[in-house]
Image (cartoon, rainbow, N blue to C red):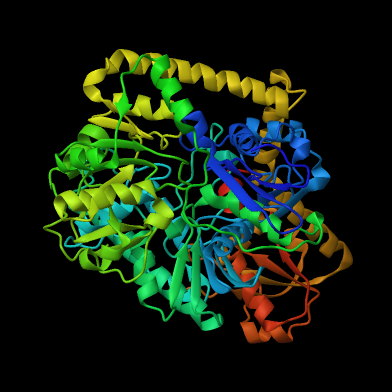
Amino acid sequence: MAKNASLKYVLGIQCFANHDAGAALVCFDPQGEVLDYVAISEERLIRKKFPYTFPLHSIAYCMEHFGLSELSQIDLIVGDYIRLKQWFRSSPSYFSTEFDYLKLKFDYDPKKIVTISHHMAHAASVYYTSGYADAAILVVDGNGSELQTTSFLQGDGYNIKYLDSHKAHGIGSVYTSVTAWILGFGHGGEGKTMGLAPYGKDHPQVLDINGRFDGVHTDFSGFMRRMPYSDVLNHIPPYERINPLHGEYKRCEDPSDLLNPYYSRVAFDVQKEAERAMTHLGKAIEAVSPSKNLCLSGGVALNSVANKIMFDSTDFESMFVFPACSDAGIPFGLAVWGYYNARELGEFPRRTLSFPNAYTGSDYGDDRITSALKTYGIPYRETSVQEVAQLIADGNIIGWHQGESEYGPRALGHRSILADSRRAEMTDIVNIEVKHREAFRPFAPAVLADHCAEYFDLADESPFMLLVANVKKPDDVPSVTHVDGTARVQTVTREANGKFFDLIEAFYGITGVPVIMNTSFNDAGEPIVETPEDSLICFMNTGLDYLVLGDYIVSKHAVDKDKLAKSMEEDRREAIEKRERALIERFCPGYDAAEAKAFIEATNKMAEWHVRFGAKYETEKQVAEWVQGGAKIAIVGTIDHTLALGKHINRFGELQVQGFVPFDTPQDRDGANGESVPYRIIDWPALDRLDVDAILISSHEFMFDIEGAIHQRDIGKPVFKVYDDMSRSILDTLADMPVYPC
């Protein structure tokens, strides 16, 4: 698409090093006649999962889609923030990488960059693509701006506003922590936990998570530490990555142990808590929103089991879940938020976004496909959906590459591996011989939408494979029926899915079953394929029988797979590296490797200081001011933390403390070991009447809870918090430091 001078462009990119880095570009004209978009995740282009890299390739991909050659042709960039509302180093406590240096060098006018909250970007991604005129918007993830974990928002027309938000302890961080610290799945393994959960149903309970819920607030402080714990200290010696969980749990070191009673029950326990939390949140947002439509986004929205249970427990009439509801969809949310909200773009008639499917990438076309095949001397011929459907019915496993790639982690019929849903053995064959992954992982059914209710307990469409339902005919479709009798359903229509619909319809005509097995086109540990070359390499490295690229088919018997795959992988690696060098030169002029190294080292030293000593430094400044001015202080907090302040904060013992309110918790989670503070103990009502000049919050774990309680009482006194959103507790960082005499 060539650059049109009358068109305008909004680019969305995350402003911090994100595991789901990517870019999205919205194109529109000020007359309100054009609204178009493209979006891609960086991992698809550099062939590395969870890259945490600056999305140079994604930016170029989006620009090339619209025929743009210069960054100056982009009218506005919208980014999110993680701790501080700023474009550069949004979290000064985060581990610095080349991402931060490339941002410094990025050749774009900072005055044309707008920053919004992470959860607002999630909300924009789902609301503006929903087609709803109004909606309640529920965002649930692990960690957003200023430690947000859960947010209620309301969409009305083209406007979105916050209703309420919760920080620090949330079901997203619980689920991720259990996945990583007990089950040992590592980053991005939450889907494995969800698949493992049904195997633990009949075993004894292991986890007593027992979150406390009140409106938007989901308090899991009895089970795990509050954030932050994902900071620079996790990345530099001699520090070790901090365990976020309270209590002692076994950690799975051998994947073959995952199906034993202990670990499978761990998965079951955390999944059930996720379902309980989401059910509460669905009802809670329903109580404060006037809308009958629900939009759901954030990483927890990938929990398709909890989504269905939550929706069924409410009186919402419809629900929409964005296909890239995890952080992969943040760039799209940023770009589309800019289109509807950024004043910098001026006044013009906005139009409703059309989002018929998740195919947000670029179409490589027949020329690119045949060029790749001819370059490597790979025999191919034309095929038809009728032939491919017959191959599937005959028991063959197909790599299916069509049109534009899907956005998000689900393959939805353009980058898919397809097999016969009627053959029970396909579950193990595809898991073990093709995908090379755990045998307990389920597969999704892609079903013609008009036949969905016949096979699945699902009244609504599920176009993005984000709802799990009971299977009504498990004997007919055993390979897509999980051990608990459920399936993560994708409903398919001709209008939204085109050729993929035609294929399933042809399979239905042959077999009488309108359902095929659909899973993502990738090998274990790899991103979903993007280019024709990616599909060819994956085809040759896996147990696929045939590869269909557009209208062309390749047989596994037609090529020397081992030899050719290695050659193609090397060519791809060299091409990616060459392109990256060119993109750095193009987008980040003045890049210097030595300067980058020095910058990264210096910023990491500053980050380490901030995490370890920032709270001490700021608190000592405030204490000195209070002591010098003779201020009267009240303290609200926990006993052991307050005692630690007395030991590690200079002149803390000189404060005129008028009273101490111990924060009421259901158990002694801070573990004061029987010690007491040297202050008069008072209760909350007494605090209201106390003659003080300021209130000091003395807790890291419960800082937000205490702040909220003080705010609710409307005491009208200045409040000082020892910590910002980036600091760790002095109970951790100063434990081995010298102490001041009390």
Q: Is residue 468 left or right of residue 659?
A: left
Q: Is residue 666 left or right of residue 609?
A: left
- Numbered-mark total: 0
Query: Quarter-wise, where is residue 476 in the image?
Result: bottom left
The percent position of residue 388, horizontal first and vertical second, equals 25, 39
In this view of the protein, can residue 516 be seen by the observer?
yes
130 versus 712 height, above or below: above
The percent position of residue 402, horizontal first and vertical second, equals 40, 39
**Residue positioned 56% across, 64% down in the render:** 127
The percent position of residue 451, horizontal first and vertical second, equals 26, 64
**Residue positioned 23% across, 46% down in the render:** 258
Q: Could you say which is closer to the camera, residue 511 or residue 637?
A: 511
- Which quarter of the rendering shows the N terminus? top right
Q: Is residue 29 left or right of residue 526?
A: right
Q: Residue furthest right?
A: 629
**Residue positioned 33% across, 18% down in the render:** 378
The percent position of residue 356, horizontal first and vertical second, equals 49, 57
In this view of the protein, can residue 182 be seen by the observer?
no
689 versus 260 height, above or below: below
454 versus 444 height, above or below: below
- Which quarter of the rendering shows the C terminus? bottom right
